[in-house]
Image (cartoon, coloured by chain):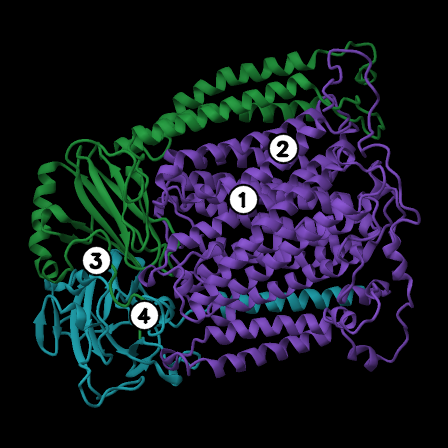
Chain colours: A green, B cyan, C purple
Amino acid sequence: MSAEAHPGTPEPNHARRFTAIWLGASVIATPLVVLLLGPELPPGKGSEQAAGQVTDNTVLLGMATPVLLLVVIYLLYAIIVFRQPRGGVLEGPAVRGHARIQTAWIVITSALVISLAGYGTVRLLADNGAGSGSGPKPLTVPKGHRLQVQVIAQQWAFTYRFPEYGGVETTHLELPVNQMVELHVTSIDVIHSFWAYQLGVKADANPGVDNIAFVKPTKEQIFEVHCAELCGIWHGGMFDHGRVVSPAAFQTWIAQQQRYFAPATKVLEPYAKTYSPEPTRRAE
Amino acid sequence: MKVLGVGTAVAILGVLIGLYVSSWATNLPPQVSGSAAPASSGGTQLTLETVAAVGPKYSPSHPDWVSYLVRTHGKWVHSTNFTVPANSVIHVTLYQYDGDSGLRNPFLAQVQGTVGGTETVDGKTINAIKPEEASHTFVVPQLGVFVPLPGVEEEAKNQCEFAPCEGTAHHTITFSFRTGKKGHYRWQCFVPCAAGFIDGFGGPMQTFNYMDGFINVV
Amino acid sequence: MSTTAAAASTPQPLGRPLWRRLLGFNLLTAVLLGVGGYYLGWFIGHQIDGKSFEFREKIDENDVALLLAYFFGVVGFLIGLGFANYPISRLLGRPASLREKEEHGIGRYFGLCTDHKVVGLQYLVGIGVFFFVGGLNAMLIRAELLHASPTFVGPNQYISLVGMHGTMMMGMMTSGILGPFANYFVPIMIGARRMAFPRIEALTFWLLMAAGFILVSTIFFGGFPTGWTGYQPLNDQAVMGMDSYICFFALVGISMCLLGLNMMATIITMRAPGLTWSRLPIFVWSVFATSVLMVLAAPMLIATLLMAALDRSINTSFFVSGGGGSSYLFENLFWFFGHPEVYILALPGFGIVLELLPVFTRKPLWGYRLAVSGMLGVSLLSFFVWQHHLFVSGINADLRPFYMLSTEIISIPTGFIFLCVMGTLWKARTSFSVPMLFCLAWAFNFLIGGLSGVFLSDTPSDTTTHGSFFVMAHFHYTIMGGLIFTFFAAIYYWVPKMTGLRFNERLAKIHFWSMFIAFNSTFLPLFALGMEGMPRRVSFYEPKLHTLNVWVSISAFVLGVSMLVFIVNTVYSLIFVRIKAEHNPWRSKSLEWQVPTPVPVNNFEQIPVFDSDPYDYGTPLPVGPGRPATAGT
């Protein structure tokens, strides 16, 4: 037995000692992580959906911290305390398991995991898809007026169409603050993914698919737009900056876009959920 | 004996890795600087042409691919890697020898981001073309420059077969744009002009030095 | 065990003249026939093509020709190695034999050999070479990311490097532990004289080598832009280099499927007397769980790639929305293979760690049955989670709560493995030899990988992290931290047995510490980069992320150097110094350490009889607070 390593001194109660260290560390670290790191978590509070993701990330981080500490402290404790003396040939205790610990572990991890999945589901439905692309028929749809904005992805640029404003198409995206926006993301060639980072929106752009995401920006800001799905040579170059502005500024901007892009708007195809331009197969 | 064996192996490996890095991974076409424009207009001049087939002289591996070429020191060079000065006006003269393919997104038929928001095609100043007439576009998304290039009519006689094209049927297109701060920007074509590839966007449309390039603003 | 009797036929006649030996079925013939087959396929492809499909006359891209060239090249290569001899001679009515096993000398490592120990070493070296090719690509990617916009490598080359790195690692390393170590040690551990299908065993290795060369050859055909996922329709759109990817992954799939089948057959049918399922070494269990995944998942990949090849070559439209197909179909089919695939990579690592821990802690494996059920549970559940890769794609959005649940449930069996590791470490007598250090590093790395996975399995959180560097960091922690670290643990643990030679311990420790520190210093910041909004596979990024990227690149170069330390150690210890290893340096009680070194061709003179599992370590406990479980565990 391990008493051989410390002749004379009684073996301390390792289980109690380790539990005390871990509990102490968790009680201190978890609130610190949640309170200090939580507000800094991505993607920030640029929209209702982004703020929901921050809350979600904070909960997950708060759950993960004690688990991380449990294993890391355990490993360190075991490494430091349970050693073979240099050149020693001592054997450890021949314990092959512990039914109660195993049962407790299974029950606790199952409860933790299932409650996390439950929380994620609640979050997903409460935030109307939490900014993610939710397919052509989203499960939950926010009430009230939703500004329709279509995102058309193409190798290698995003363009935006506003059906409520004469179907005008623009090269940049501006959105009014505190207005629920219904994004219709589609592609006219390969798979792209529309990622408005600060707004917490990510929706794949699939050819022939209308992928809907909801977002309600809550402050005036500049946000980054990236493509998040590999789409060819200029995948990395497919980025831009969009703006969230006041409703009045948005009206001014969209009117100006309608004027500026009048020549292009004349030749556009009529607004549709998806587009299938020629050539659909191999170009000749 | 062992030292010799291991040494040879290391040397062979080193050479292989060196070749892999230098002649494949970092292999880029030469950078071509814009030349000084005539004093009357000032700025920098960039002379380009687009051709339906680049020809075996410029691209032995893909003679059939559609491509851009650039003129430097009086010769056409197969490169899409341009260098222009920052905070200045770039005058582009483009000889368009290729026929039309039509845009996938007709929206891009409008000229954007050039000086005056227009381009000049064979002497006529316009701010948009017909989407189905587009042959190529010259677009630098990060500079906001979108220039659609109308193609040569199919009925036109004297079509150019492959590069370099001189004097055959073409459009002469000119436009100017301003460069801002220094940077390394990409430019590309938006017309599905790659024959044989799905959506017309494979092959030359996705291979550097054909329909894609860099603009180094220095 | 009467099957081995046939092996005792006439030995290979040695001492024939050189020209006669070069004429036979060997690697040289294989390469010549491979090249010949390649040009034959190329020629046939150009005859077929261009006439039936008019549009191809205008272009010099000929996918039919390249696919046929690869196909005939591989067939020629295998015939040259002698894989056709046995079926043909059986068809001609000649008796069964295992003659290929009876070769002697260094030459048997360069050809078809049915000795599972030779195949194991072939695998170790072959996979090692391609692992370093993949690593070199990673170095070039990081060199490019030293700049916020592309400057060092060309844009096409960058995308191809990303794809080649990912595909090489995800393809080749599926057999990273099963290839070398399971082939070598599973028969010995279960008291068998050979694998169930020795020729298929050799075939899996040579298929993988052919595949590796095909993937590298993509650089001559323009590379491929899709990354390792090969999403359609980008796949369909790409130049001929894409065909290299398709052939590579299809061959890997065939190899994987056959390897898994062989392992399952061996483990089920060839266990020695007394080796009941509950006495099976835990490593063999992990191989079994992995094999189930390989056999069930790989055919899906092969079928998917066949459809992709048809789309590319003869213009079908399985995946082209304009032609009535769907890009979703590819995503679905690919991830139905792709998610089990990542567990194919992770599970053998679990097995290595649990197998090595008892040896170095001098304790029996804690919770044997829990560990087995954990691995089988992961194996089973991994078929029900694949759509978590498609949370934001818009496909089956209503099913996301289900996939969220199934994905998070998979962390329960994974947790079993952690509990078993922790239980085994409790009150242990741990000695920190190099293999043990790698196992402990696994525990840390996989913990980070697993916990970051919770963020990805949660749809609201995944909305930001999906497709970003966060995912990249996550799967490098699980795959590099989970597989590659245990791969090295296995190398340091078992190569002394395989070669009879010892590694230099000081260099090994330098390798471990530099690798562990550089690994964490490379991939921890990537979580932050992903959270700051950097998408994967880009060569442009926001200037604000430049400092962090430079830090990561430099760490990655240190990681590369740590791999060089390993190579130096291997060359120094195994070629120059050649100190004989002790017979059983780790005082292991497992069967493979009880047989002589080098292991005889037929492993055992007499088939052993088992009366316990191999974890008979430790001194029995008197009655105490940690009293043994009654549930049998």
User: Mark 1–mark 4 contact, CB under 8 Å?
Assistant: no
The amino acid type, in three-letter code, at marker 3 is Gly
Q: Residue at x 78, y 9 (%)?
A: A10
Check disc 2: other Cα within 10 Å, few if <14, some if 14-19, many if 20+. Answer: many
Q: Residue at x 65, y 32 (%)?
A: C373
| Label 1 – label 3 distance at C-alpha | 37 Å
Say which of marks 1 and 3 sits in front: 1
User: Mark 3–mark 4 contact, CB under 8 Å?
Assistant: no
Residue B144, which numbered label?
3
Q: Secondary structure at mark 3?
A: loop
Say which of marks 3 and 4 sits in front: 4
Q: Which residue is mark 2?
A: C374
| Label 3 – label 4 distance at C-alpha | 18 Å
Say which of marks 1 and 2 sits in front: 2
Q: Chain of mark 4?
A: B
Of B147 and B30, the residue lying toward us? B147
Q: Position of residue B126 (x, y in %)?
A: 9, 69
